[in-house]
Amino acid sequence: MSDTPTELERAIEPWLQHMTWRRDFARWRERRINQEQYQGERLAMLERAAGWLSEIRLLDLGAGMGGFAVAAALRGARVVASEYNPAYCEIVRLRAARHGLNLPVFNTAGEALPFADASFDTVVAWDVIEHVQSPAAMLSEVARVLRPGGHCLLTAINRRAWVDPHYHIRGINWLPRRMAEAIIARRGRTKAGAAFRDMQRLSEMHYFHYGQFVRLCKRHGFAVKDMRQQQLRRGQLRSPKPRRRAIRVVLRALGLEGLAYRAQRRWYVGMFELDLVRVR
């Protein structure tokens, strides 16, 4: 492999420097540069929910650096990318060009999508809703551009997350926001100096209790399915660590696995991975 940075790498590099505190920064950086190669799990989630990718019109809302959009397009989905950060829009185009794809990219906010009603079979919004100005307005727009019966797959951050997904610090979500942000600053993990346009400070972002978020989705015309809980019920949820697998075996034998999952979702897990079905 050449040591000369590609145009895509040069475009991505400035958007990584605020994360150099990560112990796994080198590996994380490589995954950002080759993001489309690491989308297998989320592509599988999408196929379980929406069927064959070659048959769907897909909006990647908040496409970020384009890894998922490009991976889905390579699987045959008819993908449109929507992204608020203009620099990220260019990164999506460069990533698509690397694979010879002509992928439409729109620079727009999630609360004002420039698409006709019922334009898409499926919408994905990975790691997006916590950063928008109005989660309710975004959900309203998603409902509008999604056909009846269509799916929106999204993630939402747990207000009680024990390890914060953005700052990787234990326990800060259980503290007042001002105190938590002081700890983030002391640990050198703020995004000060980065040119993000969306909301990035902990006090600005939208985190949710599970029931609270489900009620919000229902008010905007969605039925809500927890994709991880569905995997658990099918016996397909995998635990990466042997100790956790052993605990789950015991809980399953006692008939308590479902209860333990719901407790973890309420009080501990970092994010919810949800399938919102547009009610007909």
Image (tube, rainbow, N blue to C red):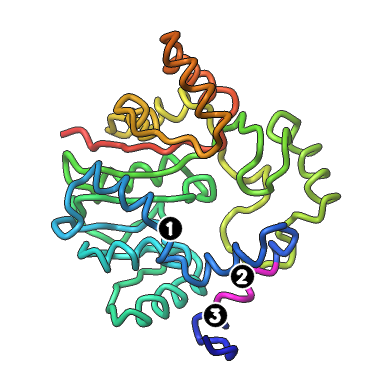
Going 48% across and 39% down the picture, which residue do you hit? 156
In three-dimensional space, the C-alpha distance between marks 3 and 2, rounded to whole angstroms, equals: 10 Å
For the image, the number of numbered tags is: 3
Looking at the rendered structure, the secondary structure element under dot 1 is loop
Residue 62's tag is: 1
Residue 15's tag is: 2
Q: Nearer the viewer, mark 2 or mark 1?
A: 2
Q: Which of marks 3 and 2 is nearer the N terminus?
A: 3
What is the x, y in percent for residue 220? 32, 34
Q: Looking at numbered disc 2 in the image, what kind of residue is underneath it?
A: Trp
Going 31% across and 37% down the picture, which residue do you hit? 276
Q: Nearer the viewer, mark 3 or mark 2?
A: 3
In three-dimensional space, the C-alpha distance between marks 3 and 1, rounded to whole angstroms, equals: 20 Å
- The 10 Å Cα crowd at callout 1, few under 14, some 14 to 19, many 20 or more, is many
Residue 140's tag is: none
Going 49% across and 50% down the picture, which residue do you hit? 127
